[in-house]
Amino acid sequence: MNEKIQKENILGLFKTIKIIPETNKNFPKGKDFNKLIKIGNELLKKNLSLKKISEILNLREDYTEEYANSLVYLDLIDPYHEFIMGNKTTYYRLSEKGLVIFPLPGNSKLLFLTKTILEHQIFNTFFKTYLETNNLLSNQEIIELLKDKNFYDLKSDEDYNNASLIVNSWIKWIIDLYQ
């Protein structure tokens, strides 16, 4: 079993992070970060169809796609399509970054996944705020900051509310690594 990650490890990592530019990838919708790790670990074994990942996670395909797209946002997996007899099937494989991170043992993998999250300005900002205040921002505070960033796929109040839940969930996942 892994030893608990020390807060100092997270803080040291946080100080070295270089923010990457946001792309036109959809904002993540997979709330449970442990499910994202499970997908990555399964993709270490072989590329999988959306349907097969749904079976592994025991989720409907639309929810599974949200989790897969969260990993695409983090640049950890790549989707591709195969057309067989006129039917399109979506498959996923680990990206170059995913091929580096997912084989790592225990805490090393968790630290690199933390780094991957915090390289995104929006998550970095909220984590920094948490470190300064020792409090998570409210959903409304997150929504206001998200609106200032103009993510192209966040349009409705429901989109922004869901995005704020994702932000808090992923930041809590990081905090739980050392608390």
Image (cartoon, helix red, strand yellow):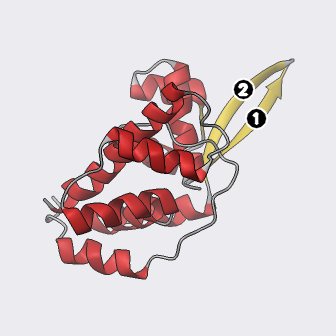
**In the shown orientation, is residue 105 left or right of residue 175?**
right
The answer to whether 73 is drawn above or below residue 32 in the figure is: below
Considering depth in this image, is 121 or 101 the residue closer to the camera?
121
- Secondary structure found at label 2: strand
Residue at left 44%, top 32%? 162
Q: Is residue 137 at least partly visible in the picture?
A: yes
Mark 1 burial class by Cα count in 10 Å: few <14, some 14-19, many 20+:
few
Q: Which residue is mark 1?
A: 81
Give the quarter of the image for residue 20. bottom right
Mark 2 burial class by Cα count in 10 Å: few <14, some 14-19, many 20+:
few
- Secondary structure found at label 1: strand
Give the quarter of the image for residue 38. top left
Asked if the residue under mark 1 is in contact with the one under mark 2, i.e. CB atoms within 8 Å, the reply is: yes
Residue at left 54%, top 71%? 19
Q: Is residue 38 at least partly visible in the picture?
A: no
Instruction: Give the position of the N terminus as an image quadrant.
Output: bottom left
Question: Which amino acid, by three-letter code, is at mark 2?
Answer: Thr
Name which of mark 2 and mark 1 comes first in the sequence.
Answer: 1
Q: Which residue is mark 2?
A: 89
The percent position of residue 79, horizontal first and vertical second, equals 67, 42
The percent position of residue 147, horizontal first and vertical second, equals 54, 45
Question: Which amino acid, by three-letter code, is at mark 1?
Answer: His
Callout count: 2
**In the shown orientation, is residue 73 left or right of residue 7?**
right
Instruction: Give the position of the C terminus as an image quadrant.
Output: bottom left
Considering depth in this image, is 119 or 160 the residue closer to the camera?
160
Residue at left 30%, top 49%? 137
**In the shown orientation, is residue 65 left or right of residue 11?**
right
The percent position of residue 155, horizontal first and vertical second, equals 62, 32
